[in-house]
Every structure is written in C-alpha cells, then in structure tokens.
Image (spheres, grey):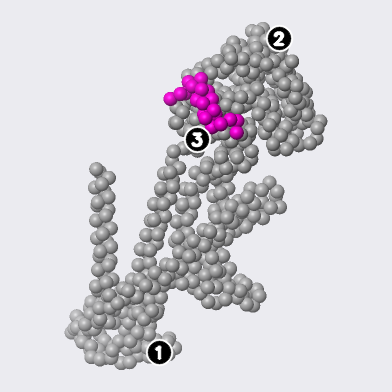
Amino acid sequence: MKKKVWVAVLAVLIAVVLGAFIWFVYFTGYDYSMADDDTVAVGDFTVAAGADGSGSLTVKEYNNDKKGVSGVQLNAEAGDESFFMWQIDGDYEIIAGNINNEVIRIAPKSDLKVLALYNDGVNAGPANFKIVFGSLNEGFVQTLKLFLITLLGAIPLGLIISFGSMSKFKPISAPVRVIVWIVRGSPLMLQLLIIFYMPGMLFGNNIWGGDETGRFWASAVAFILNYACYFSEIFRGGIQGVPIGQHEAGQVLGLSKSQIFFKVTLMQMIKRIVPPMSNEIITLVKDTSLARIIAMQEIIWAGQAFMKSSHGIHGIIWPLFSTGIYYLAFSGMLTLLFGWVEKKLDYFKV
Amino acid sequence: MAILEVKNIHKSFGRTEVLKGIDFTLEKGEVLSIIGSSGSGKTTLLRCLNSLEFADKGQIVVGGETIFDADINKRPSESELRQKRLHFGLVFQNFNLFPQYSVLDNVTLAPKLLKKGTNEEIEQTALELIESVGLKEKINNYPCELSGGQQQRVAIARALALKPEILCFDEPTSALDPELTGEVLKVIKSLADKHMTMIVVTHEMTFAHDVSDKVIFMDGGVIAEQGAPSILDHPESERLQSFLTSF
Ligand SMILES: Nc1ncnc2c1ncn2[C@@H]1O[C@H](COP(=O)(O)OP(=O)(O)OP(=O)(O)O)[C@@H](O)[C@H]1O
Ligand SMILES: [Mg+2]
C-alpha cells in the first residue's frame, strides 16, 4: 500500500516535470542563446524609459570581420528588464529584447549579469521539435553503436587481460598490470585524443581518416581498450574471489578441470561479477559522450550542434538538455535489466 | 592386509619441512583419529592422501595398489589423478558445499558428472544418504539456508555418494558452534558403526577416545605417538602428555 502511494507520487512528479519540459520546448519555441552570426532586423526600437527618463536608442548594422560576427549594433541608455543578450563594442554590451522585438533594457558593461532570452518572433517549436529529435535520434544511434561495439570488444579482451594479469609468469603479468594501471589511472578523454591523433603525429598520416567513420573507429578502439582494463579487474576479482576450497572440493570429488570450471566456479564468478559489471556498463553509457572530443557525432554533439547553427536551426540550447532524456531512459533500462539478472542469481549466496 | 599403507611421507613448503617421515597403516573398517597441535602437519598429511599436495618422498598404497610413489618422477596425467583421488573422500573443515546447488544437487553432481549410474539410481542413493544424515526435509534447500552442522552433514553425504574406500575428515567440527558439533559427530559415529574406513583429524578428544580404533598424535611433522585410543588415558611421551593437559 505504502509502496503504491510512493510510486504514484513519483509518477505524478515525473509527469509534471516532463509535461512542463515538453510544453516549454514545443509551445514556446524560445531559443536560449544567439549565435554570433545571427542578425536582428534593423529598425526602430523603442526603449522603455530608464529611471532617469532617458531612452534613446540607435541601431546600426554591425559587422566585425575579425570576430566573424555581424549583426546590429545598438546604442542605448540603461534601462530595465532583460530578455536577451547581444554583444557589441562600446560602452554597452547588453541589449535586452522582448518577444515583440522591443528593446527594453540596455545595461552597461559593468552590469553584465544575465544571459537572457532571444526570440525571433516566430513560434518555431513544432518545426524545431521534429528536426531536433530527428537529429538527436541519429546521434543516439551512434552512441548506441559505440556502446555495443565497446561491450562486444571489451568483454573478451578484458577476460584475456585478466588472465594475463593473473599469470604466474612475471614477464607476462607485470607488463599487463602496468598497462592496466596506466589505462585505469588516466582520463579516458586523454586516451581518446592520443589514439586519434598519435598515429598522425608519428607517421604523418592519420590512419583513422578524418571522416565520421574514422572518428567512430578511433573512439571504438579507445573505449574497448579502456573498458577492457576495467572489466579485467572485475573479472580478476570475480575469479580470485571464488574460494580455493570450491576448486579443491571439486578435485576431491574427481571432477575434471573443465567440469570444475563450468559446473562449480563459473556460476559463482558470474554472481560476483554482475553487480560491478552493471555499474561499469551504466558508466559506459554516459562515457560514450566523451567521444565528442574527437568530434564523433554522438548524441551530445548532435544536441550541441543546434547552438552552433546546424540542421537549419541555430542558437537554441534546449536540445542539449534533451540528450539527458536519452541517457536516463537508456541507463534506466539497463538498471532494470541488471536488477532482474541479480534477482535471478539471488537464490544462492557466495 | 592393510587397506592403507603410508610409507615415509616427507613434504616441504619451500624451506620448511612440514612432514618429516610419516608411516602408518590402516585396516579396512578401522577409524583412525589424528590429533596434534596446530601446525603439526595434520592437514598437509590429509591433502597428500587426497592428491591435493604431492609428497616429496614416500609412498601411499591403497588396497595393494601404489597410488603415489615419489620415486617415480612422472607426474600422473589428470585422468590418472582423478582416478586416484576417488579412493579417498575428504570432508573439509569449512564444508565447501557448492552454494549454487541445492542439497540434493550437491550430492548428485559428481556421481552424475562421473556417470556412476543412471540418474534415477544416483538420485535414489543420494536421497538415502541425505536421509541417513538426517536432512530429508532439506533436499531442496540451498547451503545458505542451512546451519553449519547441517551443511557439514550434507558435505559428508556428498563425499559418501562416490563410495570412497577411505573417508577423511579435516577437523569436521571445528568451524561449528559447540551445540552443532554433536550432530556431526553422531553421523561420523554411525558411519563407524557401519565399518566405514575413516581418518579423522580432530580436536574432540572424547570422540577420538570413544569412536576410533587407532590414534595418531602428530607433533612437528612426525608421529610422536600412536596406538590404541587408550594412549589418551596413559600417554607415554611427554609431548602427548602436555598436549592432553591443554584440553
Ligand atoms: N601451501 C602451503 N605453503 C606454505 N606453507 C604451508 C602450506 N600449507 C601448510 N603450510 C605450513 O605447514 C605447516 C603445517 O600446516 P598444516 O595445515 O598441515 O597444520 P595442521 O596440523 O593442520 O594445523 P591446524 O591444527 O592449525 O589445522 C604450517 O606451519 C603451515 O604454515
Ligand atoms: Mg589443519
């Protein structure tokens, strides 16, 4: 009973938040920032009177080749209420506009406080919505591909590395452990950069190729290497965690090595491995976003692209936040899946 | 003829010599208790008998067949080794039941994998064994649902399912609370009554005295004294005397 109430409260909360979000992006169509190359129609703006009664405003075309920006330059007195920001040279740096393109606040440089809203006067919500989620879906497919290929490569490689690090033969185990230490001890972002750029720096040509496929495979290699090292430690823990007594009990019962492995120790290893693996795999979901450092077009890249004028829409920031929904949904599904697996293994204790 | 002859067993780990020449024989149907202070090599001796360790010197003969001879420098193949291990059963101090299997499956796993009969036969025998250790109601429970004493009794049934000629126990009750010790010792005693040949490493002096046919006192890797259980009442050596006064 109590549990049901909580579930209901949670469901309502989630519905409210999601509803508010969808309303916000769909029906308001507000864009949260302005691209550098955006233009504002030159015309007469009215400026609400400032506290001192002044309110003059001049608008002229603004073009700065050096900065690569163009637009309008506005000059006005300090006023109130701010909605959008526009950077210009001179004493005043903020121009505030409202929905009706009325500039209602100009602030001096020293008063720079708010990043405000810009609106182009059109409710672009419904159109944007389709384009944005279409593009985010593409980015997500890339993310998913990277995720699956990383798992597919890192699990077997991790197993091999774990056997290497457990080897009694020092010339094998020592270097393997050093590699694992380096890979686990340095940022994945750095590894991505090294794997993508190093071949080019060393041999003068980028073996990956500069296109999206090349970037994808460079990312995949970096992720597989990185995650294989993490997985190898989990496997090592799982394998070494099975008490030697289990092996010996199998031996004195006359079982063969493979019978002991498959019928006695494997299940206990799996039981030990599942919880840390599920943590690591959910971390991987989120880590895939790091691939953008070498400009692989994963989902956050796709989201951020809208800020930089691509896909025909520009200067909007909400798609970036929307990528969070994908991550939440994906990791939520994995959490449920692993929870189910753990529950299945709950019938015995190790 | 003795079912087991142990001849001049030596075993070292690195530089420490743990067994320094162990000799004894055991007749079929006899119960041998091995006592001795911690570190005297009792576990190591059982492990050598079960081929979990290999002695550096000496021979082990079971029923006239030499199953181990340190002078033969050839390491046995895995299948030979498995065959040799089946002469013995071993019950561990900490049970080592397979946690992912039910009581019944723990007992039937090895016989089924070793194809010791049809599945029906194996299960029938297992049920009888489980009943004989008093756990009929628990056949479908998992080890984590059992008390220590119950787990150890399952471990005994599991070892018996392979019909070993000699069943070894390594301190079968020392991981148990005192009130659970009795139920396990009762099971071992009932096996003795059925003339199961057994070697029991134990710290339970009353048990060693009442159940065994023969007692070996080990000290510092050698047999310091051996004989009928009455040596526990009238120890000859000073070492056994002082060992017994510590109880
Ligand atoms: N694998 C091993 N490597 C190195 N030393 C070992 C090994 N196994 C046992 N030993 C040493 O051999 C000696 C005898 O050990 P063992 O376990 O046979 O004694 P025990 O008589 O069974 O003692 P306890 O009553 O405490 O069980 C101990 O000093 C122990 O440290
Ligand atoms: Mg011992």
The location of residue B175, given as percent across then percent down, is 54, 26
Mark 3, mark 1: which one is toward the viewer?
3
> Which amino acid, by three-letter code, is at mark 1?
Asn
Q: Quadrant of the N terminus of chain A?
A: top left
For disc 3, the marked residue is B101
Is any atom of residue B112 visible in this view?
yes
Q: Position of residue A18 (x, y in %)?
A: 28, 62
Q: Report x, y in % for residue B124.
A: 51, 26
Q: Residues within 10 Å of mark 1 (few under 14, many from 20)?
A: few
Give, as a single range, the part of the protein colored magenta: B115-137
Answer yes or no: disc 1 within 8 Å of ligand 1.
Answer: no
Residue at 62% x, 77% y: name it: A205
Q: Secondary structure at mark 3?
A: loop
* Residue at 25% in and 78% down: A123
Pointer 1 chain: A
Q: Earlier in the sequence, mark 3 or mark 2?
A: 3
- Residue identified by numbered label 1: A64
B139 in relation to A299, above or below: above
**Letter of the chain that mark 3 sits on in the rendering:** B
Real-space Cα distance between discs 2 and 1? 109 Å
Q: Quadrant of residue A52?
A: bottom left
Nearer the observer, B160 or A97: B160
Q: Is residue B25 left or right of residue B145?
A: right
Under mark 2, the amino acid is Glu
As drawn, is A82 to the left or to the right of A340? left
The residue labelled by disc 2 is B236
Is residue B129 located in the magenta-colored stretch of the structure? yes
Predominant secondary structure in magenta? helix
Q: Is mark 3 within 8 Å of ligand 2?
A: no
Q: Secondary structure at mark 1?
A: strand
